Amino acid sequence: MEKTSIFTSVKKYSFILGILLLTLLSGCQAATNDPINANSTGFFDHYFVYPFSELIKWIANLFNENYGISIILITLVIRLALMPFILKQTKSSVQMRDKMAVIKPDMDALQEKYSAKKDRESQMQMQQEMMQLYQKHNMNPLASLAGCLPMLIQMPLLIAFYYAIRRTPEIATHSFLWFDLGQTDIILTVIAVVIYFVQFKVSQIGMDPKMKQQMAIMGLISPAMIGFISLSAPAALPLYWAVGGLFMIVQTLIARKMYTTNK
């Protein structure tokens, strides 16, 4: 018996938005890196970046000024908070995919019926019959667009945390494990790149071969951009990405276990 894959279109949108996020971060490398504080101006700095910076320092102080532990814990908390939305998205995607498989014969027959009828009246009639088919099976053809909502929710949080790490000067004066958090670390950069590549491969398990081929380039772009940014950034950033990537691998495996079906 073969396990069916998670609704592939949502996966595609996930990778596209992920790459857009990385592009935004890399493009903003030249943006201000001034230390963040209570007097920082701008809505995003004041209400998003500054609170994250304070949270980083507060948790670090709980662990004897261990900023590495602080970054790891906050990353996990953010990912755990977003996880119910991601799992709900996955569940909805699988349900939509299963319903589409049920109505596919009827949809194919309907398209064949109107294949030679290109006039406006016939096309409108076909659309009406399609909507009746959707209603019969309690389907909303626009529901899959809601799959992008969790990705849109997480973007401001992840961007704010990214800049809080870059703009909290206390981080740069501390070390974690074998590396200085304020200096570029090649080994950690390689680890982060490998983790994101593995995460991409895990997300492809059970995916339609055609979709795999379409997403092959996107899957390489994401780890490459992680490496590019990390080579000119303090080690605190690839630490954040490595932890987040490991969490996403586990999350993907959990979602697959919970919501894929045997056929």
Image (cartoon, grey):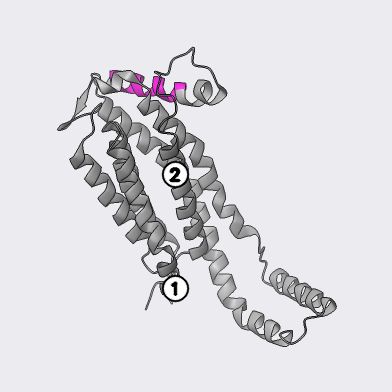
Question: Which residue is painted at 44% across and 15% down in the image?
Answer: 37
The relative height of residue 253 versus residue 170 in the rendered view (above or below) is below
Question: 209 or 52: nearer the eye?
Answer: 209
For disc 1, the neighbor class at 10 Å (few under 14, some 14 to 19, many from 20) is few
The relative height of residue 197 versus residue 62 in the rendered view (above or below) is below
Q: From which residue to which does the magenta span run?
A: 50-61
- Label 2 residue SS: helix
Q: Quadrant of the N terminus?
A: bottom left
- Label 1 residue SS: helix
Kindly identify which residue carries mark 2. 23
- Where is residue 220? Give x, y as percent: 35, 57
Question: Which residue is painted at 52% across and 63% down in the image?
Answer: 9
- Where is residue 99? Give x, y as percent: 58, 71
Where, by quadrant of the figure, is residue 204 drawn?
bottom left
Question: 232 or 19: nearer the eye?
Answer: 232
| Dot placed on the residue nearer the N-terminal end, 2 or 1 | 2
Q: What main secondary structure does the magenta stretch of the protein show?
A: helix
Kindly identify which residue carries mark 1. 210
Q: Is 23 included in the stretch rendered in magenta?
A: no
Q: CA distance from mark 2 to mark 1?
A: 26 Å
